[in-house]
Amino acid sequence: MPRRPEGLPPAVPFLHLEDTPLATLSEQIKSTATGPLRLLVLSESEEWPLALRELLATHDITVLKAASVYQACDPSLLSMTDAVVVCDPASDPGGRTNANLTEARRASRELLGDALLAHRLTGVVLSEGATGRQRLDEGAFLVVPPDVPADELWGRVATIRQYRPLFSQFEQQVANMQRLGKRLNQQFVAVDQELRLASRLQRDFLPKTFPEVGDIRFAAMYQPAAWVSGDMYDVARLDETHLGFYLADAVGHGIAAGLLTMFIKQDVVGKRIDRNSYTLTSPSEVLANLNVDLARQELPNCQFVTALYGIIDTRDNQLTFARGGHPHPIHVTADGQCNEVLTVGGLLGVFAEETFPSTSLVLRPGEKFIIYSDGIEDSIIAHRDRTQGTVEYTEFFRELVRMPIETCIATLSAQVEHTEGSIAPDDDMTVVGIERRSCSCG
């Protein structure tokens, strides 16, 4: 029968693994789960260090004795253990010091270290030589001299016991967070796919080509801040001689603003068709109708829209437009002079009785008419003096508008894409440019 370690007080509960079935041991341990500290002692010798014997004599401890590393590594045993003390022999069978452990001893120590780490335990090693946290590389062992005071040894094993349940709780919380992270990632992937689809559908509502009537040509730039944009534009041929166009900007960007653009798309009607005839709707009336319909919706969270709607009569190249809260359009002369065309008109969807007076101008050969959403204003306006009513345009924009409208808009788009922060812009950026060519040829 295995001997009781020399010097171990009779009052200290002692369970030797070689003569105690594990099932029986488990039941005994459970009965003292909230009582004595359950200390696993790994020692090849029956002579234990004085510090360990004093510890057992002065504290409420249940001792489990393992004579080999393989016994100590049993998962069922480690799950019932509060702390582990390893008693290193003074020397190995070859007479060498502990600093020169044989490969076999090193391998067994590594095996024990893996088992302890797996069970969130730290082994206190009573050993001559270096002290400190070892694994001796990952914190599986804490090496102290065998003559360490019993109170210090108690502090170490009691701390291990105290913090081991916390490690288990942390581990459970980490597992829960990993499961939550996995679910959130799946949801993010699903939402991303849905937003990509919404983005493609929204782009499908934009004109893929522009009508060409007479000398009038169109070009557009469209760069949403997110998958779904709050900007919407369109150009449509109303009849043989009239072209209608608009640019609308729902407040903000993203899904809510994107949904509002679909409402705008359906509500902007440039002509009323009767049985055998049609009537073109004036820009003032188009915006007034849109404003009333938006106001009737009583949209929450101060949702509103800015827009500009216009008509071009290609017979005399007269452009008539109305503006509702939108940035003032820019009229560019043939020699590149830029001037804002100032009109009145409040935000859409706020006051149902708001009016939107129309303004007209004639596009002469080589002239342009540019409308834009406020997200790109910094690339166009360098400085605005509201007290004097003056505007200074960026040098880049002044050079840009001298180019043909297609090149002008394409260059502006490329410049915006290479600007710092273009990957995640603060707002949607849309520009619609109109040009009357210098001649009807080509």
Image (cartoon, rainbow, N blue to C red):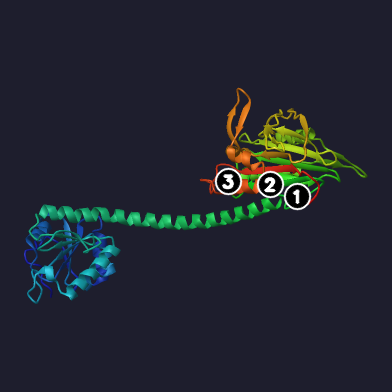
Nearer-the-camera pick, 317 or 194: 317
Which residue lies under the disc numbered 3? Answer: 416
Q: Counting other residues with Cα less than 10 Å from the Cα at mark 2, is it few (<14), some (14-19), or many (20 or more)?
A: many
Residue 210 badge: 1
Dot 1: element: loop
Please tell me whether residue 104 is drawn above or below residue 320 in the rendered image. Answer: below
The quarter holding residue 131 reads bottom left
Q: Would you say 116 lies left or right of 229 here?
A: left
Which residue lies under the disc numbered 2? Answer: 220
Dot 3: element: helix
Q: How far across and how far down the image is residue 286, in percent?
A: 78, 36
| Alpha carbon distance from label 2 to label 3 | 14 Å
What amino acid is found at the position of numbered circle 3 in the picture? Val
Is residue 388 in view? yes
Nearer-the-camera pick, 164 or 97: 97
Q: At 7% from the left edge and 58% from the top edge, which residue is drawn?
A: 147
Q: How far across and how far down the image is residue 85, in percent?
A: 17, 62
